[in-house]
Structure formats: structure tokens, C-alpha cells
Image: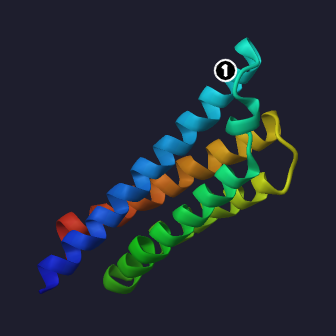
Amino acid sequence: MADTFLSIRQRFDRAGILLAGLCALHCVATIVVVSALGLGSHFLLSPEIHRFGLALALIIAAVAIGWGALKHRRAAPFVTAMTGLTFMGGALAIPHGAGEAILTLIGVVLVSAGHLLNLRPASRSD
């Protein structure tokens, strides 16, 4: 039973890392496509995409990071991921542009790092 829960948590951590990577790709692609071609700005810069992405990141992190924190009692994954989610939330509060992209990219890197830290103890002590 414990192995099943570990496997589910690891999948959530991996999903969180994938989501963070997709978010980073979206940020970079949006800047390149909108700047270079002027295409897709309505869709790519839509606040709904960013809100949905943050909500999904919050859910995945709450399950994976929260579960991991309860299991292995290490604060580093939790603090790292929550700091990243804070940066991502802060990016929603400012206008589109370089500042928003920088905050978002910092956030997704930190959230990914939190998930990676959360996976490390799973392979050693869980």
C-alpha cells in the first residue's frame, strides 16, 4: 500500500515538473512569437491561460509537495515550491511583459526544484 502511494506521489511530482516545463516553454514561445511575428497575442497572452496554469500548478503542488512533506518531514521541497508558486502568482498581478515573464520563469524553476527535491527522498528513504 505504501508503495502505491509513493508511486502516485512520484507521478504528481513528475506531472508538476512537466507542467512547469510547459509553462516555461509557453512564456518563451509567447515572447518569441508575439515579438517576432505579432501573431497569437490574443490567445497566448490571455489571462485565463495563466490563471488556469497557476491553478493547476497549485493543485499538483498541494498534492505532491504536501504529501511529500508529511511523509519525509523535509521543509526544503515545500518552501522551494511555495516560493515558486508565490513568484508565479505575483506574475499574474503585473501587466504582460518582460517583468511578468521573468517572475513566471523564476517561479517555474523553483516549483520544479521543489518537485525534484520532493522526489529525492522518495528514492532513498520512503
Position in image of residue 79 (x %, y %) = 56, 70
Query: Residue 121 versus residue 10: which sits nearer the camera?
Result: 10
Mark 1 lies on a secondary structure that is helix
Position in image of residue 103 (x %, y %) = 72, 46
Q: Which residue is drawn at 84% across and 57% down?
A: 93
Residue at the far right in the pictured view: 95
Position in image of residue 19 (x %, y %) = 46, 51
Residue 2, relative to residue 58: is it above or below? below
Q: Which residue is under mark 1?
A: 32
Q: Residue at x 44, y 79 (%)?
A: 66
Residue at the far top in the pictured view: 36
Q: Residue at x 32, y 80 (%)?
A: 72
Q: Which residue is drawn at 39% across and 72% down?
A: 64
Residue 39, relative to residue 126: is it above or below? above
120 on left or right of 21: left
Quadrant of image for the N terminus: bottom left
Query: Residue 105 versus residue 31: which sits nearer the camera?
Result: 31
Dot 1 crowding, Cα within 10 Å, few <14, some 14–19, many 20+:
few
Q: Is residue 74 visible?
A: no
61 on left or right of 97: left
